Amino acid sequence: MRIAIGSLLQETNTFSAKLTRREDFQIHAGNALLESARVEQTEVYGFVDVLSRKRGVQIIPLIGGWAVSSGRMLQKDFIPLVDQLLDSLRNAGPIDGVLLALHGAWAAEGIDSADGYVLEQVRRLVGADIPVIASLDLHASIGNAMASSANALVGYQTCPHVDTADTGRRAAELMASTITGAKRPTMAVRKLPLVTQAEQMISDRGVFRQLLDLARDVERRPGVLSTSLFPCQPWLDVEELGWCSVVVTDNDPMLAGRYADELAQAMWSRRQEFVISLPTVDEALEQALKIEGGPITLGEGADGTMGGSPGDSAYILEGILRKGLSHLPTAAVVVDPPAVARAIDAGVGQTITLSVGGALNPEYARLIAVTGRVKLISDGEFFYKGSCYKGRRVQMGRSAVLKINAINLLIAERPMPTTDPEMYRSHGIEPLEMKLVLCKSPLSFRMDYEPISKAVMSVDSPGCCRADLTKLPFKRIPRPMFPFDIINDVMLSRTGSLK
Ligand SMILES: [Zn+2]
């Protein structure tokens, strides 16, 4: 049995003006894909971990890689990238199954569901009889093309996502039992007219944990092979946006449908609990000042780099300066290529005045003037050491640290997930010695910052990952939709699935 495996992952934020390009993807092919998957502990590593232990299974690595969250992908770059995947599949010779790791909230110019396009093309290439199974991020927005092209979709069960490899393992086990004929997966997908902010989608507590516990309970019932909840990422102005539930059973479409209905109803009934109001920048800073010691870690979720913002805003930093708090030891970060160039031109030890913010997504960003001393210049490369993406190499482009009184402002050329303290530590800034630590994340920063912080707060500010979705210019999403409209009786839409 020959199983082709590959991956293409990006989470798109359609409100970001920074479009995604081919060079934003770090793509590996063949054995290099397997090696990078092992180092980064991705879904592909999970695929390999399971399949390599199955007797008689040969793994055929295609291409794979990911790009940091950003705006829609340029179509002129998107089509050739998918063609590269399809060519590698075409050249793989006869195969018995295709396992793909996709995100599920990837969009390109003119293509609302890039993942749906990929799955459709793969299905067209391999025909109706070869099983195609995809793993997905929990923030996937599943549409018709995805549901009708894959035999099964298997989502992460944690948020922040610490089960990428495990999700790969679950998808691979499903594939292994499918190609031997031991199981015949049939999938039901139920879409909801529902989208919410991200702050409550944390899997170790509260309402979301209870919903995930219910999904695990359903998964243990007889005949069920897999259940997934997909509370999609909300900054995606696409025609098929919406939360959904997915249940895969062993050749029992009625059962899959009934359980998918049950999960979707449970998600719908708890929707109000996902809507919370956050403190403004000024309120958060006032609260932080009342707390003795530090660090107080503030999440600027509206500028979240894992949600597709370029990380080029400076609302909290502006608040700190405006309130005369620059004497507080602070770790801050902003993505601003021209500011990095200015700092490098000036050189270490020089004092410079420059504007930071708004370099990549000016419509949503805050621009401020700062004066500081260039403390450090680097190539912006480091390895994550925390619970998310452990081992993954990050390249945030050339970087500089500007010392503004007691503020350490890390300026980078390229967006990166800012959730790991190693980002600061690799640039000589120790979060534990700070009063304030700023992250550009609505949620994921809690994993590694809660254990080391006196307090952790999510802060409301403008931005293309804003928590208050009613403040964003949605145009393409289906209506009515919560929280934009009042919906009393919800009709679950049954997105198509393979017969
Ligand atoms: Zn996600």
Image (spheres, rainbow, N blue to C red):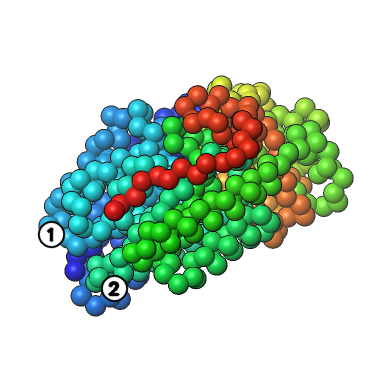
Rendered location of residue 33, percent (x, y): 30, 57
Q: CA distance from mark 1 to mark 2?
A: 21 Å
Looking at the image, is 55 positioned above or below residue 262? below
Question: In this rendering, would 54 be left or right of 423?
Answer: left
Asked whether disc 1 touches disc 2, contact meaning CB atoms under 8 Å apart, the reply is no
Q: Nearer the viewer, residue 228 or 298?
A: 228
Residue visible at 41% across and 66% down in the picture: 225
Q: Amino acid at mark 2?
A: Ala
Name the mark nearer the viewer: 1 or 2: 2
Rendered location of residue 479, percent (x, y): 52, 30
Rendered location of residue 330, percent (x, y): 72, 43
Question: In this rendering, would 184 be left or right of 257?
Answer: left
Report the disc number at residue 182.
2
Residue visible at 28% across and 29% down in the picture: 76
Report the disc number at residue 236.
none
Q: Quadrant of residue 453?
A: bottom right
- Label 2 crowd bin: few (<14), some (14–19), many (20+), radius 10 Å: few
Q: Amino acid at mark 1?
A: Pro
Residue visible at 56% across and 41% down in the picture: 490
- Label 1 crowd bin: few (<14), some (14–19), many (20+), radius 10 Å: few
Report the disc number at residue 94.
1
Q: Is residue 350 visible in this depiction of the protein? A: no
Q: Nearer the viewer, residue 71 or 120?
A: 120
In the structure shown, which secondary structural element does the residue marked by tag 1 occupy?
loop
